[in-house]
Image (tube, rainbow, N blue to C red):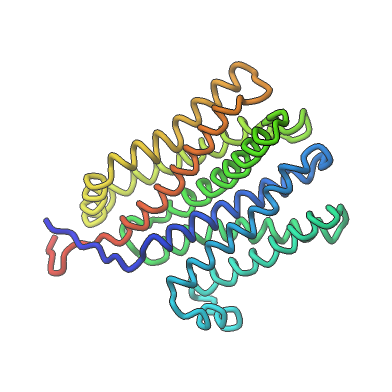
Amino acid sequence: MDFINIGAWDIRITLDLFFGGIGVGAFLLSVLLSLYNRESLQSTIKIGAYTAPVSVGIGLLLLVSKIGVPAKFITTLWNVNLQSVMSIGVFLQIGFMVITIWYAVLIWKEFPVNNQFRLLQTAGTFFAFSTGLYHGLFLSSLGRVLWTELTPGMFIASSIAAGIAFVLLLKTLIDLVTKDEVRTDLIQSTLPLGLHRFQVMFFIILLVQLVSVILWQFYTGRLELEQALIYDYFMKQYGTIWTSLVLVGGIIIPIIITLVSLVKHEKNMAPIPTIIICVLILVGSFVMKHLLIIGGQIALPVGFVF
């Protein structure tokens, strides 16, 4: 059977989702760390704060270039259609962009701790989660076969993991270049649930991502006939890449490395394993989103009869 790939969305959409996701994860990490002993965590907090607006901005520019009509993109702000996921999503992303810029400027200038700063963090956290969920909700709202109700969970988990990985990767590389002591434990006993360690952060969010991906794979191929046929075609075409780079490389191997570190009660992850984990997570996040964008545009041939 010859399937059809609509191909209306190219890699710019993937890059928008990828960079936007990194911005979401980086901002959330920066806010989380700023709640605890900010003096000891300033470098990591600043990297997250500065990464967020740059990453989200790159994603928005790519999205505008794909839309092709920047004026239409801008006017969406005052022509919000509450029944349009796209319209609401544009509003959320630009709102999140404004907040991340404001937050980064405050971090750079004075690093304040007051009610207004906390209110900005709260608003930014809302927009971050909303933007992360929107990336998946937008796809699932289009009614394409592979963009199911499980897509939002996969996307937001992947985005948070990628954001944390990007910040940690930058921090590790900067420490290596400046010959500072590489620290990946953050700070002792200040964050709940052991979140003062990146190993715990990665383990929790990657476990959530693993569950969401397995559920997506399990249910997508076992629903309606059209869904099963397209899912089967998708796995035949991209199954090797999906399994090796997304499932094994991007999730399972980082989980194993972080779990080994936790079992050994290591305070810090060594630089090389840290870099390996971060690169694997980033590659896995990008490949997952790109393959889902491609797969969602696969359709049965016109006139096909079940």
Q: Residue at x 51, y 79 (%)?
A: 70
Residue 221 locus on image (x, y percent): 28, 47
Is 121 rendered above or below residue 81? Answer: above
Q: Residue at x 41, y 43 (%)?
A: 213
- Name the quadrant containing residue 302: bottom left
How many marks can you see?
Answer: 0
- Name the quadrant containing residue 3: bottom left
Q: Nearer the viewer, residue 103 or 218?
A: 103
Is 17 rendered above or below residue 194? Answer: below
Residue 210 seen in the current view = yes
Residue 193 seen in the current view = no
Residue 240 locus on image (x, y percent): 28, 39
Is 72 rendered above or below residue 300? Answer: below
In the picture, measured across the screen, residue 139 lies left or right of residue 229, that is right
Q: Quadrant of the C terminus?
A: bottom left
Q: Nearer the viewer, residue 119 or 286?
A: 286
Residue 252 locus on image (x, y percent): 44, 31
Q: Residue at x 56, y 79 (%)?
A: 74
In the picture, measured across the screen, residue 215 lies left or right of residue 71, that is left
Q: Nearer the viewer, residue 150 or 287?
A: 287
Q: Quadrant of the N terminus?
A: bottom left
In the picture, measured across the screen, residue 114 lies left or right of residue 88, that is right
Residue 35 locus on image (x, y percent): 79, 45
Q: Residue at x 68, y 22 (%)?
A: 267
In the picture, measured across the screen, residue 156 lies left or right of residue 225, that is right
